[in-house]
Image (spheres, rainbow, N blue to C red):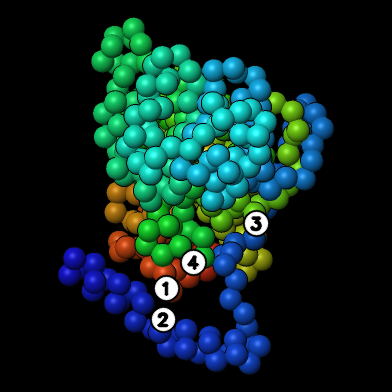
Amino acid sequence: MAASSKLMHKVFKDASQFLKVGCRLQAQNVICRHASHFTYFKDEPLKEFGDTSKTNMFQAINSAMDIALDTDSSAVVFGEDVAFGGVFRCSMGLQEKHGKDRVFNSPLCEQGIVAFGIGLSVAGSTAISEIQFADYIFPAFDQIVNEAAKFRYRSGNLSNCGSLTIRAPCSAVGHGGLYHSQSPEAYFAHTPGLKIVIPRGPYKAKGLLLSCIRDKDPCLFFEPKILYRTAEEEVPVNDYTLPLGKADIVKAGSDITLVGWGTQVHVLLEVAKLAEEQFNVSCEVIDIVSILPWDKNTVCESVKKTGRVMIAHEAPLTNGFGAEIAATIQEECFLYLESPVKRVTGFDTPFPLIFEPFYIPSKWRCLQAVKETVHY
């Protein structure tokens, strides 16, 4: 704890003065503070998926669950406050359409929510559960890693809970503080038997959520909550799925590979633009999409081409999932590397409230890392 406090002091020692200046400038209408720390880059859906409509991410998730309930009579949606739409409105209107026996509230008990979902799944139903914030998933940790993930293995494949999907809003939102901003994906990535997915926007969210709901393994679907309303793009109206475990090269490049997921993909796309303008550096940006399983081949092939790599995520540095990616790159691409693997992450402290802009891996921190890596 002492080390954590010292690090916090070191990182944020100038932040108080910076914020005082910022407040004075804001009072003079010189600057204003925005919650979003990124520019959203829209996806283009495949034409084969048919007609599209402008949709934000919570609407896309709502559409995915609506389709799942329509196409699977055993599907149920449940969690804290989901009956009236949930705190982020992702399940809005579903109970009115599909009935109280298929969309309903749960007690305020995350362990009970997941345990109930496991039971439903084992009995043959499709369980779509919601943990209201990913920060509160930890009371259900035992149910997820010791029951859901191991059910198929311990039964010798005689039974499983593969039709269980657990949704949870995650990551920074601009004002969430230590209990509503965490990114807990790495805790679960150490658990064989789970699949973990984090979408970067509405188009990906709908297709990936439908894939998770229909997958034969229990899935954790973490939704960066800052994207619920800030991310808006054309999304296919009809039913479609997108592959799990397959990374996307969202921007091709030749000098350095930038790897991220969720909101951070958009930060890295902006970094790539800045790097090209300021340093004449060509960045290849990869969204790994799935944390477990993750697409090692796409990442390693890119790194072998560029010779340099930076990994960025909001979770703390130590044992963040970026460490697993870095270790794999070192094993698979060592002779191709022109510089050490670089990580830009949150710090090894609790997630701060007022100091959030200094904590997250912003475009400026990432751009500096690109410069250091290229000039190594």
* Amino acid type of the residue that numbered disc 1 sits on in the rendered structure: Phe
Q: Residue 86: where, in percent of width, then height?
A: 54, 46
Label 1's element?
loop
- State the separation of the CA atoms marked 4 and 2: 16 Å
User: Within 10 Å of the Cα at label 1, are there few (<14), some (14-19), or many (20+) other Cα atoms?
Assistant: some
- State the separation of the CA atoms marked 4 and 3: 15 Å
* Amino acid type of the residue that numbered disc 3 sits on in the rendered structure: Thr
Q: Tell me, yes or no, whether the two marked residues, 2 and 1, touch with CB atoms within 8 Å.
A: yes
Please determine whether, in this image, residue 27 is positioned above or below residue 151.
below
Which corner quadrant of the image does residue 115 belong to?
top left
Looking at the rendered image, the disc whose residue lies closer to the viewer, 4 or 2, is 4
**Res 257 visible:** no
- Label 4 sits on residue: 175
- Apparent side of residue 16 relative to residue 202 in the rendered image (left or right): left
Q: Earlier in the sequence, mark 4 or mark 3?
A: 4
Q: Which of marks 2 and 1 is nearer the N terminus?
A: 2
User: Within 10 Å of the Cα at label 2, are there few (<14), some (14-19), or many (20+) other Cα atoms?
Assistant: some
- Label 3 sits on residue: 230
Which corner quadrant of the image does residue 340 belong to?
bottom left
* Amino acid type of the residue that numbered disc 2 sits on in the rendered structure: Ala
Q: Tag on residue 15?
A: 2
